[in-house]
């Protein structure tokens, strides 16, 4: 994973499609979904960390 598009594709593997029309809200939902996947043992710590870093980077760009 290197881009937010990669994160979106990653979430789609788990049947998660997020689009609210609000970029900030979408990014918050990505974080929530990634956290839930990790807490349920469905993704590794490496996948979790990469995804969260990418999402946080995108959130910083919005500010």
Image (spheres, grey):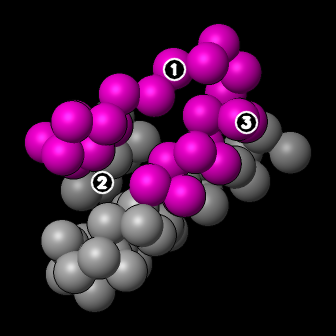
C-beta proximity under 8 Å, tags 2 and 1:
no
User: For numbered disc 1, what is the local secondary structure?
Assistant: loop
Sort mark 2 into few (<14), some (14-19) or many (20+) by Cα contacts within 10 Å.
few
Q: Residue at x 60, y 34 (%)?
A: 26
| Residue nearest the viewer, comparing 36 with 63 | 36
Q: Specify the farthest residue to the right.
A: 63
Q: Examine the rendering and report whether any part of residue 35 can be seen.
A: yes
Decide: is 50 above or below 45.
above
| Residue nearest the viewer, comparing 39 with 50 | 39
The tag on residue 19 is 1
Q: Residue at x 86, y 45 (%)?
A: 63
Q: Position of residue 42 (x, y in %)?
A: 18, 71
Q: What range of the chain is rendered magenta?
A: 8-33
Mark found first going from the N terminus, 2 or 1: 2
Sort mark 1 into few (<14), some (14-19) or many (20+) by Cα contacts within 10 Å.
few
Decide: is 14 above or below 44.
above
Q: Residue at x 31, y 36 (%)?
A: 16
User: For numbered disc 2, what is the local secondary structure?
Assistant: loop
Query: Which quadrant would residue 4 be assigned to in this image?
Result: top left
The tag on residue 2 is 2
User: For numbered disc 3, what is the local secondary structure?
Assistant: helix
Mark found first going from the N terminus, 3 or 1: 1
C-beta proximity under 8 Å, tags 3 and 1:
no
């Amino acid at each position: 994973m290197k881009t937010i598009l990669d994160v979106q594709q990653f979430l789609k593997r788990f049947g998660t499609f997020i689009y609210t029309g609000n970029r900030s809200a979408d990014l918050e939902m990505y974080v929530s979904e990634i956290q839930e996947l990790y807490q349920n043992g469905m993704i590794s710590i490496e996948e979790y960390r990469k995804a969260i870093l990418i999402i946080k980077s995108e959130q910083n760009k919005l500010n």
